[in-house]
Image (cartoon, grey):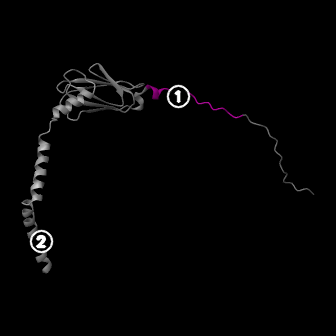
Amino acid sequence: MKHHRLIFLSLALIPTVLILGCSTKFGRTLEKNIESTKNGITNTTTSLEEGVKNVCDQAPRVSDDADEILRLVSSEDNTVFTVDGKKMGAAKQLKVCINSSGEHTVKAEPPGCDAKVERIKPPYDFPIYEFRYMLAECHEANAPAAPVVEAVPELINIPVKRKSKRKSH
């Protein structure tokens, strides 16, 4: 029974201590820190549009009115990505900046493989487009392999002395 009273008394004292603590110098300092943190979060100078613009400044642009990042991914290295007839670069992954309100034609062409063309249109809910290539789609993989000829070592005739299993009388 004493334990129940002790627990109840402790729970009743915690809010009292917190209320008194907030009126002290510590409490006022804590409130100021919380308020300055709130101001820092809400009064930021970087908006979402500025962030997109900065990212688009670093990526190749399809057009002057490009405003959204599109990430192109290929299963093959050195894939040449072309968007709306404009070569954007060669890589396994490439970020390009496109116009978010228009349709686009994306072409991916890795060396030695067939080109794949994808028509995309808004809304770009998840702007990552992946191009996967199977062995049958790559010419180098289908080409017959050159026969591998290994050098055969020359046989050397070394006489071998054999013991006879016959017993001599």
The residue lying toward the viewer, choosing from 140 and 168, is 140
**Amino acid bearing label 1:** Ala
| Residue farthest top in this picture | 85
The residue lying toward the viewer, choosing from 51 and 90, is 51
Image quadrant where residue 25 sits = bottom left
Image quadrant containing the N terminus: bottom left
Residue 100 place in picture, x, y as percent: 18, 27
Image quadrant containing the C terminus: bottom right
The residue lying toward the viewer, choosing from 147 and 76, is 76
Residue 88 place in picture, x, y as percent: 31, 23
Give the mark nearer the N terminus: 2 vs 1.
2
Residue at 11% x, 69% y: name it: 11
**Amino acid bearing label 2:** Ser
Camera-nearest label, 2 or 1: 2
Res. 57 mark: none
Q: Which residue is mark 2?
A: 10
The residue lying toward the viewer, choosing from 52 and 130, is 52
Is 6 placed above or below 114 here?
below
> Is residue 143 within the magenta segment?
yes
| Residue farthest front in this picture | 25
Q: Which residues are magenta?
A: 139-153
Residue 30 place in picture, x, y as percent: 12, 55
| Residue farthest bottom in this picture | 1
Res. 145 mark: 1
Residue at 9% x, 56% y: name it: 28
Q: Secondary structure at mark 2?
A: helix
Q: Is residue 104 left or right of residue 149?
A: left
